[in-house]
Amino acid sequence: MASTDMLWARSLAKKKCVRRTTEGAGVPLRIKHIGTGTTQAPTVVLSNTSTTLTLTDGAAAATAIDLSNASYNTLGELADYINGLASWKCKILDGLRSDATDNVFTDGAVTSAVKDGETVFELTQLIASAKLEVRITADEAVTSNRAKGSHRVTLDAFSYYADLTAAANCVQIYDCDNNGKTETQIWGATSVDTTVVTYAPNVAGTNIYPFNGITAAEGHDLVIVITGTVVTAPTTNFLQAEFTRE
């Protein structure tokens, strides 16, 4: 059981945050080089129409991963494989372990960038991936010493606009236990086509739906998924989440 002091400190440290993605800008996987080689700068490249992911470490050792292979064609399988390599680590962000990997990432060389204090490579979704996803997590870093079990996140409100075929259960929220690698849908709603829809607490009105917020289990993440998205208006499709980190 958490101590009173720990709960008090967590409450004092809580922070309001926003994460937003547009179609084609989601980051299903964040990859970090942890090797010690200094022969060259590490590189990450997608080729063969986003079917092959090649990781070349600082010692110039290349690992080519065939994303059409049944062993790596889901995000969970790919992440587990990369995390088993000596020179690389990764973290699933805007996605679920069951998501496909073959021909869903943007093709070409991936430019490194500093995110959350780490130099990382972010694989982004193709516009045609037909999905909007955002992960709500207490820690977006690939390698971190933060104790995940002592932190939690609460989804306070979210909104989206998507050109899609409206259907039941196409707006979904999953609770994700990353240690146990289980993802459980805990909330769902019927999607709305080409309309800005906002779910917010204690509010009702045009295009606004009552929503009392959802708190993930201790140390777990939440992932919001809008499915059925098409590319008729990819520049206007978006998903935005307002949440609290503790």
Image (cartoon, rainbow, N blue to C red):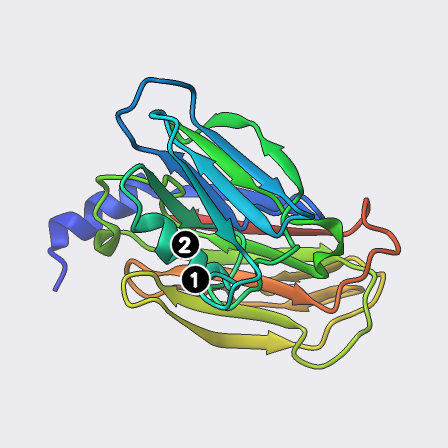
Q: Where is residue 229, by image quadrant?
A: bottom right
In the rendered structure, are the residues bearing label 1 and label 2 in contact, judged by CB atoms less than 8 Å apart? yes
Judging by the rendered image, the residue that carries numbered circle 1 is 76
Q: Where is residue 188, by image quadrant?
A: bottom right
Residue sitting at x 32%, y 49%:
83
**In this view, 55 is above or below 1:** above
Mark 2 lies on a secondary structure that is helix
**In this view, 114 is above or below 18:** above
The residue most toward the bottom is: 168
Residue 192 image position (x, y, % from top left): 79, 69
Quarter that holds the N terminus: bottom left
C-alpha gap between disc 1 and disc 2:
5 Å
* Residue type at the position of mark 2: Ala
- Left or right of 21, for residue 6: left
Labels in figure, total: 2
Q: Residues within 10 Å of mark 2 (few under 14, many from 20)?
A: some
Residue sitting at x 37%, y 39%:
141
Mark linked to residue 79: 2
Of residues 130 and 6, the one nearer the viewer is 130
